[in-house]
Amino acid sequence: MSTEDALARARAAELDLVEVAAQADPPVCRIMDYGKFRYEEAQRLKESRKKTIQITTKEVKFRPKIGKGDFDTKVRHMLEFLEEGHKVKVSLQFRGREMAHPELGKKVLDEVLEQLGPIARVDTEPRLDGRSMTMVLSPDKKAAANAKKPAPATTNVNSTKTA
């Protein structure tokens, strides 16, 4: 159909003539309400963005001489962050003479990993940057999937009947 005929049909229907595929030979056009088309396209994009999950990095700060109660509370918060799917940056701040003993900081970070168990995966190994030691953890998808699945019921195969 010629361009003039297509434009005449679009005007008669009070719609727009929209070029759909310019690279085709001849170019493909469509008669539609362009404003409505753009609105629906925007709504589809908005809906698809709603379903995406944004992963953020949460930071938890420790000190080399942290108390047991504070340590447990912070590890519990880290566990919640990892279960929600966030990455966790573990920072250990040194002050004064504590800088002479980085092994104390490494020990605290090792205890954190031990407490979190298989749920956390180490992205960045602990390293000393100035007065702080940092480590980045991310949730381990395999461990989270295994934790959600219920354990299969076991039956006792070795039971014998006595009459």
Image (spheres, rainbow, N blue to C red):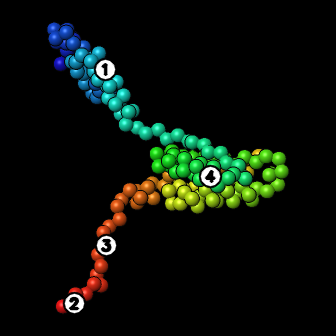
Residue 78 coordinates in the image, percent (x, y):
55, 48
Q: Amino acid at mark 4?
A: Gly
Residue at screen point 51% across, 60% down: 118
Quarter of the picture holding the C terminus: bottom left
Q: CA distance from mark 3 to mark 4?
A: 38 Å
Q: Badge 3 is on which residue? A: 154
Disc 3 or disc 1, which is closer to the eye? 3
Number of residues whose C-alpha sits closer than 10 Å to that of mark 1, classed few (under 14), some (14–19) or many (20 or more): few
Q: First in sequence: mark 3 or mark 2?
A: 3
Identity, as a three-letter code, of the amino acid under mark 1: Tyr
Sequence-earlier tag: 1 or 4: 1
Residue ID for mark 4? 69
Badge 1 marks a residue whose secondary structure is helix
Mark sitting earlier along the chain (1/2): 1
Q: Which residue is mark 2?
A: 162
Q: Residues within 10 Å of mark 3 (few under 14, many from 20)?
A: few
Of callouts 2 and 4, the N-terminal one: 4
Residue type for callout 2: Thr
